[in-house]
Image (spheres, grey):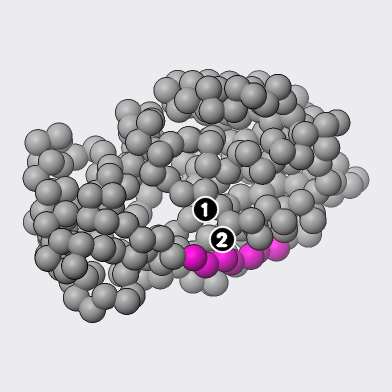
C-alpha cells in the first residue's frame, strides 16, 4: 500500500489489531544485522517506531538494552506489556524528531516499516549523530504484493477498490532497484559500508483474516467508519467468491549503513 504522509496517527487507533495482525521479519534478516554489529548486555540500541513490537524481540534476546521510541501511546503501552519480562527494554512515547538522544550513544539504531514517516534529512541526520563511531543503522520494511497463484483474485479486488479507493490498489511488486535506491540515501548523510538485502515469503489468509489485516493500513483506517465497513464487507465477499483464501507475496528489504569509525 502507498504511504500517505499525515496518516501516521492512524496506527495508534488500531493498536491491538496492529500488534496482532502485522507480520514479523525473517530470521535471515537479523542474522545479517548481527553480522554487521555485535550486541551484548553492554550494547545500546534504539528502535524508531516500534509499532506492535514485531521487530524487537530478536534484538532484546542479545541482552542489548533497547529503547523504543514510539509516538503512539497505545502502541507503546502494548509493547511495555509485551516485553515486561525483558529488563533491558524501555519505551519512550514521543516523536523520534523530539527524542532527546545523546550523541555517540548507540551501537545500533533500527527501524522496521516506520522510518518513511520521518522527514529524510531529520531522520538520517539524527541517526548519524546518535550512533557511536562504527555503529550501524538498520532500516527494513515489508512490501506485500498481490496473490500470484489465484487467477482473477487481483482483478476481483480491483473492482471493489474502484468503488471505494480508486487507483489505490498497487499492481507493481517491490523491486531490487527500489531497494538499491533506498540504501543509497544513507550515503548523502555520511554513512559508509552501505548494503541492501532482499528476502521473500508468502502469507495465507482467510477472507475474514485479510479484512482484519486491511484494518491496520493507514489509508484504510482513515476512511469514514460506515463506508469502511461496507468496503471491507465487499472485499471479504469477493475473496469468498474466489474460494475463501488469499495469499500475499512479501518482499522484505533491509538496508544497512555504518557510521565511520572516525566520524
Instruction: Farthest residue to the right: give it.
Output: 262
Residue at 28% x, 52% y is 210
Residue at 15% x, 34% y is 225
Query: Compared with residue 78, is residue 122 higher up or lower down, i.e. above or below?
Result: below
Q: In the image, is residue 183 part of the stretch drawn in magenta?
A: no
The reply to whether discs 1 and 2 touch (Cβ–Cβ < 8 Å) is yes
Range of magenta residues = 195-201
User: Which structural element holds mark 1?
Assistant: strand
Q: Position of residue 128 (x, y in %)?
A: 72, 41
Residue 141's tag is 1
User: Which structural element holds mark 2?
Assistant: strand
Task: Say which residue label 2 marks.
Answer: 253
Magenta segment's dominant SS is strand
Query: Compared with residue 54, is residue 97 higher up or lower down, i.e. above or below?
Result: above
In the picture, measured across the screen, residue 49 lies left or right of residue 100, that is: left
In the picture, measured across the screen, residue 239 lies left or right of residue 38, that is: left
Tell me the quadrant of the picture where the N terminus can be found.
bottom left
In the picture, measured across the screen, residue 91 lies left or right of residue 157, that is: right
Query: Compared with residue 203, is residue 42 higher up or lower down, i.e. above or below?
Result: above
Q: Position of residue 103 (x, y in %)?
A: 77, 29
- In this orientation, does residue 151 appear? yes
Amino acid at each position: 500500500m502507498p504511504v500517505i504522509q499525515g496518516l501516521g496517527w492512524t496506527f495508534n487507533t488500531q493498536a491491538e489489531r496492529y500488534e496482532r495482525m502485522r507480520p514479523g521479519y525473517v530470521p535471515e534478516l537479523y542474522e545479517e544485522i548481527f553480522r554487521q554489529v555485535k550486541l551484548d548486555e553492554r550494547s545500546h540500541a534504539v528502535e524508531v517506531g516500534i509499532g506492535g513490537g514485531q521487530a524487537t524481540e530478536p534484538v532484546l534476546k542479545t541482552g542489548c538494552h533497547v529503547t523504543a521510541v514510539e509516538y503512539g501511546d497505545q502502541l507503546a503501552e502494548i509493547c511495555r506489556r509485551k516485553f515486561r519480562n525483558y529488563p533491558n527494554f524501555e519505551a519512550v512515547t514521543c516523536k523520534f524528531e523530539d527524542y532527546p538522544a545523546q550523541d555517540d550513544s548507540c551501537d545500533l539504531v533500527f527501524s522496521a516499516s516506520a522510518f518513511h514517516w520521518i522527514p529524510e534529512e531529520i531522520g538520517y541526520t539524527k541517526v548519524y549523530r546518535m550512533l557511536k563511531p562504527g555503529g550501524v543503522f538498520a532500516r527494513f520494511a515489508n512490501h506485500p504484493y498481490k496473490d500470484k497463484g489465484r487467477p482473477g483474485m487481483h482483478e476481483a479486488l480491483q473492482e471493489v477498490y474502484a468503488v471505494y479507493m480508486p487507483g489505490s490498489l498497487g499492481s507493481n511488486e517491490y523491486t531490487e532497484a527500489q531497494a538499491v535506491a533506498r540504501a543509497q540515501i544513507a550515503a548523502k548523510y555520511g554513512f559508509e559500508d552501505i548494503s541492501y538485502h532482499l528476502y521473500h515469503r508468502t502469507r495465507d489468509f482467510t477472507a475474514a483474516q485479510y479484512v482484519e489485516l486491511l484494518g491496520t493500513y493507514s489509508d484504510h483506517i482513515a476512511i469514514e467508519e460506515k463506508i469502511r465497513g461496507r468496503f471491507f464487507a465487499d472485499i471479504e465477499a469477493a475473496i469468498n467468491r474466489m474460494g475463501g483464501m488469499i495469499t500475499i507475496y512479501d518482499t522484505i528489504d533491509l538496508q544497512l549503513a555504518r557510521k565511520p569509525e572516525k566520524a
